[in-house]
Image (cartoon, rainbow, N blue to C red):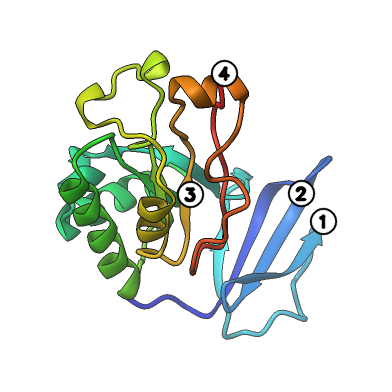
Amino acid sequence: MTFPSEWLIYNVNIVLEERIAQGAVYAKDGTIAAIIEGNSAYEDIPQTAQRIDGGGQWLLPGFIDVHIHGGAGGDFMDASQESYEAITRYHASQGTTGMLATTMTASKEAIDSVLQAVSRFQAEDMPYAALYGVHLEGPFLCLKWIGAQNSGFSVSASDRLARRLGASLSWTRQTRDACTGERRRDGSNPLAGRPWNRCRMRSYGRIL
């Protein structure tokens, strides 16, 4: 699927950081190039830009969802391209432009399958909501806060395992740490400060 390289969305209420403006947004090559306030003939906008009349509706930044398990009948744990296309298509229709595919606490093999499936999906054109990476909800989960996750797959934090999981994607968000009795008592974080290969972002959850 191909999209025009230039867009002009006009006759809209634009939600800015601190106010709302009426006018138009001009985008080029996937980047907002200009916000034009008020009524205008848009003479400075190239005629090659696709023009879309917003009909006086609201124009907001796309939502980026960092914790989403699926949608439209699909689950990221399916590890299938068909499910991922259905999920990203549905959420794009609801205003989400990017997301982190969120796993359940599951077997190493199941999590590996998701990481590989996401990598394959990222390698192709993503015409709907983009998959920026993976939110690993486990397997490093404290049993006290396991919630609806399967406690049988919870494991203690391992730098080796964390590095292997983190190296599987260009952007992996690790959000839950193990909290064994010893680590709960001294409050230490066994993974903090460790440089993961190819990881662009790290974040950590509860340390008890």
User: For this view, does 144 lie left or right of residue 115?
Assistant: right
Residue 125 visible, this angle: no
Q: Which callout, 2 or 3, points at the residue further toward the start of the chain? A: 2
If you read the primary sequence from the N terminus, does the residue marked by circle 3 or circle 4 appear first?
3
Distance of label 1 from label 3 (alpha carbons): 41 Å
Q: Position of residue 55 (x, y in %)?
A: 58, 49
Task: Give left or right: position of 176 versus 74.
Answer: right
Three-letter code for the amino acid on which mark 1 is drawn: Gly
Q: Which residue is mark 4?
A: 185
Chain-order first, disc 1 or disc 4: 1
Q: Quadrant of residue 133?
A: bottom left
Q: Amino acid at mark 4?
A: Arg
Q: Nearer the viewer, residue 115 or 100?
A: 115
Residues at marks 3 and 4, CA–CA distance in whole angstroms: 25 Å
Residue at the disc numbered 2: 22
Front-lying residue, 108 or 31: 108
Q: Specify the amino acid type for callout 2.
A: Gln
Q: Position of residue 85 (x, y in %)?
A: 24, 56
Question: How far apart in space, not on screen, are marks 4 and 2 (Cα)?
Answer: 55 Å
Circle 1 packing at 10 Å, graded few (<14), some (14-19), many (20+), is few
- Residue 68 location in percent, x, y? 38, 38
